[in-house]
Image (cartoon, rainbow, N blue to C red):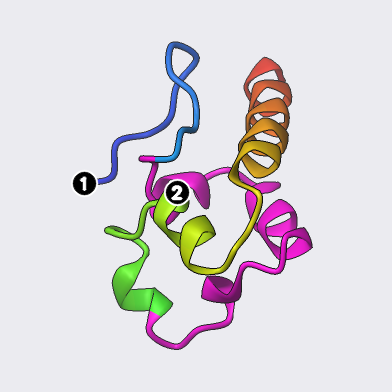
Amino acid sequence: MIKRINKKNKITENTTLAKILEFPKASKILAKYNLPCLNCPMAVFETGVLKIGKVCKMYNINLGSLLKELNEAYRVNIKK
């Protein structure tokens, strides 16, 4: 069972892609940063264990900017 991100916590470098992808705007934000995992055939099997921090490090993606944008979008999403 996937634990949902809630108002008390936020997306961090240790959050899995599966948890991040639970909210609607996440895939658009990840695509904006050219995250290759979204199109990778193996991602179906790995999203539950792949942590966003490790993925960013592997593909030289600015983790700080990505987390900021994801958390801002997530906060807007939970206020609705």
Q: Residue 55: where, in percent of width, then height?
A: 46, 61
Q: From this viewpoint, which residue is outermost toward the left?
A: 1
Going by the numbered disc 1, the residue's amino acid type is Met
Which numbered disc, 2 or 1, marks the residue that appears first in the sequence? 1
Magenta span: 14-42
Q: Residue 11: where, in percent of width, then height?
A: 49, 32
Given this view, does label 2 or label 1 mark the residue nearer the observer?
2
| Residue 39 disc label | none
According to the image, label 2 marks what residue?
Answer: 53
- Where is 45 relative to 80, above or below? below
| Residue at image location 43% in from the left, 18% down from the top | 9
- Where is 77 relative to 18, above or below? above
According to the image, label 1 marks what residue?
Answer: 1
| Residue at image location 28% in from the left, 44% down from the top | 2
Which part of the image, by quadrant, shows the C terminus? top right
Residue 36's quadrant in the figure? Answer: bottom right
Q: From this viewpoint, which residue is outermost toward the top?
A: 8
Alpha-carbon span between mark 2 and mark 1? 22 Å
Q: Could you classify mark 2 by the number of other residues whose Cα lies within 10 Å: few (under 14), some (14-19), or many (20 or more)?
A: many
Could you tell whether 14 is left or right of 71 in the image? left
Q: Residue 1: where, in percent of width, then height?
A: 21, 46
